[in-house]
Amino acid sequence: MNIPSSLLNKYNVPVPRYTSYPTVPFWKDELDITAWKNTFQQQFQISNKEGGISLYLHLPFCESLCTYCGCNKKITTNHSVEGKYMKALEKEWNLYVALMDEPPIIRELHLGGGTPTFFTPQNLEKLLNIIFSKAIISPDHEFSIEGHPNNTTKEHLETLFNLGFRRVSYGVQDNDPEVQRIINRIQPVENVKKATDTARAVGFKSVNFDLIYGLPLQNTERLKKTILQSIEMRPDRIAFYTYALVP
């Protein structure tokens, strides 16, 4: 397929990260709490009546640091943090619920990180049930999760499937062993294939691969090989990001 250069140039523009909203340029040194609450209540009423709200839950924990990462994260192998963090999210969720004048209709839900599959399947189920217990699930909802190919198990996927998830996104980045070594993201391509096949076997309808270009030690041939290997696994979507150096 030949893609016109005009189309590539049209979409080759920087856009804000969805994990930071409102985006940083809109932040102020001081926050007017009353104004914020009023704005939230107004927007909630509009969104809920139009079919439901969208939620993003950030689960920031990873067992090792990928050196390209610019996300809000906590590196630890101590999984006791799961319970403490779930309590904090429950407390925050209750603050929002208190501002709602009717049960929220959840139309879209995304679990991101960090590594959401750092959490055990049991804790993910517990956390989601905390959210769902005070909400209505839209009949045409779309739930998705980011998974690490190295630690996303069949039990993770089955638990999430039973809770309504049908979309999973795997952080592939690059399959070349040397690139993986320098970015500290060691995951054999076999692990990506296994995670992909397992998701489809469980019943997930959409599998996304995140790929990054501009990483250290990447070159045209290595990147081409990663892309061809990814295409062989036939993901439903590929998100192709540029590496961003964040001082």
Image (spheres, rainbow, N blue to C red):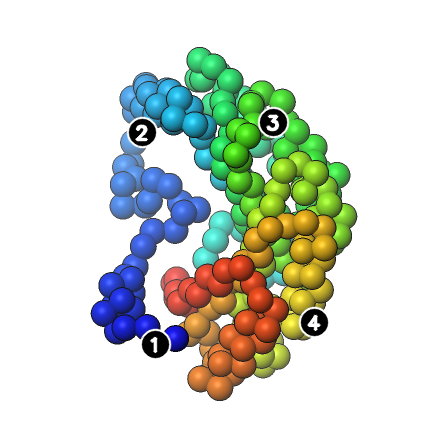
N-term-proximal mark, 4 vs 2:
2
N-term-proximal mark, 4 vs 1:
1
Give the CA separation, mark 2 to mark 3.
Answer: 29 Å
Which residue has dot 3 on it? 132
Q: Identify the amino acid type marked 3.
A: Phe
Q: Identify the amino acid type marked 2.
A: Leu
Give the CA separation, mark 2 to mark 1.
Answer: 49 Å
Quarter of the picture containing the C terminus is bottom left
Give the CA separation, mark 3 to mark 4.
Answer: 35 Å
Query: Badge 2: how crowded within 10 Å, few (<14), some, or many (20+)?
Result: few
Which residue has dot 2 on it? 31
Q: Identify the amino acid type marked 1.
A: Asn
The spot of residue 163 in percent (x, y) is: 66, 36
Q: Identify the amino acid type marked 4.
A: Glu
Which residue has dot 4 on it? 190
Q: Secondary structure at mark 1?
A: loop
The spot of residue 185 in percent (x, y) is: 60, 68
Residue at position x 53%, y 35% in the image: 141
Quarter of the picture containing the N terminus is bottom left
